Image (cartoon, helix red, strand yellow):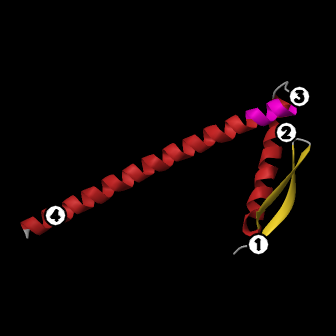
Amino acid sequence: MEENIKIKLNIGDRIYPLTIQRSQEFYFREAAKIIEKTIKNLEENYSVRDKQDLLAMCCIQFAAKNLQNKSKSNNSEIEVEKIILKIIDDIDKSILTS
């Protein structure tokens, strides 16, 4: 069983204590850095100063990107499936004409 550790992440000037698996620590810390960078970027480009609003805007951006990536992934899977079906069809035709 993997060891759990306790970490504290600073996001939007607040500390968030978490208990996570040791193998996930890098990802959580990197995610916090990305969130902080996004908040700073939003703060610089919009006249929003409320951290909760900035966090909400950040969440909306991440959720939209996640949905876009899922859509791209699904499209890729469909394309791969089409290619595989075409190859199978070509093989079937080749066998029948031999």
Can you tell which quarter of the image residue 68 is in? Answer: top right
Mark 2 sits on what residue? Answer: 40
Front position among marks 4 and 1: 1
Please report the bounds of the magenta region as a residue range. Answer: 49-57
Front position among marks 3 and 2: 3
Q: Secondary structure at mark 1?
A: loop
Is the stretch drawn in magenta largely helix, strand or loop? helix
Can you tell which quarter of the image residue 49 is in? Answer: top right
Inspect the image, locate mark 1, and give the three-letter code of the amino acid beneath it. Glu
Inspect the image, locate mark 2, and give the three-letter code of the amino acid beneath it. Lys
Mark 1 sits on what residue? Answer: 3
Mark 4 sits on what residue? Answer: 92
Q: Position of residue 60 (x, y in %)?
A: 68, 35
Q: Position of residue 75 (x, y in %)?
A: 43, 46
Front position among marks 4 and 3: 3
N-terminal label among 4 and 1: 1
Mark 3 sits on what residue? Answer: 49
Q: Secondary structure at mark 2?
A: helix
